[in-house]
Amino acid sequence: MPIVVDVDVMLAKRKMSVGELADRVGITPANLAVLKNGRAKAVRFTTLAALCEVLECQPGDLLRWEVEDAVGG
């Protein structure tokens, strides 16, 4: 997927655990792991806003776009 989620980068910068972030945002650690590991198909704006609030960052600090490699091209 061309959208990359950099939650782990912000967690390291804030010296925060996945469990603490999940608790403060109000989502399960399992759902946060899905997002963090790039397996999420979507993210709600309310969740993104809560992540930004807790991590004191902008959405662009958490999300970035990467060009996908063309297969067989």
Image (cartoon, rainbow, N blue to C red):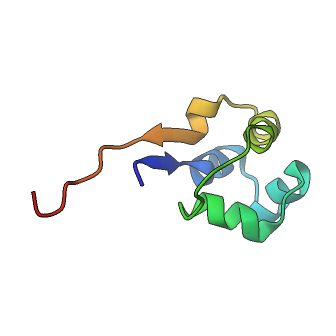
- Say whether residue 32 is left or right of residue 27: left
Furthest-left residue in this view: 73
- Say whether residue 54 is left or right of residue 13: right
The tally of labels here is 0
What residue do we see at 58% from left, 34% from top? 61
Q: Quadrant of the N terminus?
A: bottom left
Instruction: Say if 13 sits above or below 31 in the image.
Output: above
**Where residue 45 sits in the image (x, y, percent)?**
74, 37
Task: Specify the quadrant of the image occupied by residue 58.
Answer: top right
What residue do we see at 81% from left, 34% from top? 53
What residue do we see at 75% from left, 71% from top? 30
Task: Specify the quadrant of the image occupied by residue 49.
Answer: top right
**Where residue 69 sits in the image (x, y, percent)?**
23, 54
What residue do we see at 62% from left, 50% from top? 7
**Where residue 46 sits in the image (x, y, percent)?**
81, 39
Instruction: Say if 18 sits above or below 50 in the image.
Output: below
Q: Nearer the viewer, residue 1 or 64?
A: 1
Q: Nearer the viewer, residue 52 or 65?
A: 65
Q: Nearer the viewer, residue 52 or 17?
A: 52
Task: Specify the quadrant of the image occupied by residue 60.
Answer: top right
Furthest-bottom residue in this view: 30
Instruction: Say if 27 sits above or below 13 in the image.
Output: below
Instruction: Say if 28 sits above or below 52 in the image.
Output: below
**Where residue 65 sits in the image (x, y, percent)?**
42, 39
